[in-house]
Amino acid sequence: MATLEELHEEASGCTRCGLAKGRTNVVFGTGGPSARLMLVGEGPGHDEDLAGEPFVGRSGRLLEVLVRQEVGLERSECYIANVVKCRPPGNRDPLPDEIEACSPFLDAQIDLVAPAVVVTLGNFAARTLLRTKERISDLRGRCYPFRGGHLVPTFHPAAALRGGGTVVAQMRADLVRARMILGGGPC
Ligand code: URA
């Protein structure tokens, strides 16, 4: 199996879908290569496209605070990636063929990092990894066995920025669930 560095290199030249044309940088993923917690978002936005790093904008700042407060981990202690590695134009939703083209990268990242818990952020990450069409509001609030570890779906931090206190409280509860599983608790 390739290493994370080799995969990053391969992704940097990827032209498997139309998103390649509009990108400034491929946003492959960052963090500890053997992190126990992996956070998976949807796709890079404007700030991430420029920086080449996931979740560096407003959503990322909220995510960092919530993970620090509820899980007790710093950003550098988690592995962070997205379903699609290139920015969809105008921040539109990624299309099914774009998700499919990019999925081998995310699958390989999960295999290589082998986190104990994957927290998915929003509809696209949960639906892609759980292979379902259900909505995040129906999927969240529980834990799923996932590739030898566990998956905890929660809202996207952008939804929390829009939706305010109730969404933030639900995200906090989901992250507490992740912390308990990381601490050896049941799924
Ligand atoms: N939203 C995402 O889903 N991912 C990012 O990296 C930034 C914003």
Image (cartoon, grey):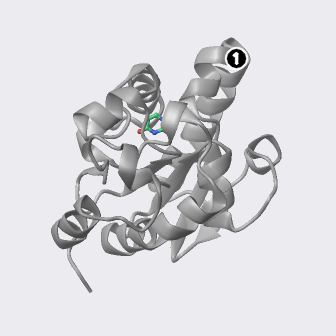
The N terminus: image quadrant: bottom left
Residue at 37 percent across and 50 percent down: it is 21
In depth, the one of 77 and 120 nearer the eye is 120
Q: Write the residue at 29% across / 50% down.
A: 26
Question: Alpha-carbon neighbours of circle 1 within 10 Å: few (<14), some, or many (≥20)?
Answer: few
Q: Which amino acid, mark 1?
A: Gly
Percent x, y for residue 141? 74, 44
Query: Could you tell me which residue is drawn at 50 percent across and 37 percent down?
Result: 89
> Is 125 drawn above or below residue 60 in the view shown?
below
Q: Nearer the viewer, residue 107 or 186?
A: 107
* SS label for mark 1: helix
Q: In front here: 18 or 118?
A: 18
Mark 1 = which residue?
Answer: 163
Side (left or right) of 11 relative to 64: left
Where does residue 152 sit, x and y in percent of width and height? 61, 52
Residue 88 to residue 187: above or below: above
Q: Is residue 128 above or below residue 137?
A: below
Name, please, the residue furthest toward the top. Answer: 164
Q: Residue at x 34, y 44 (%)?
A: 23
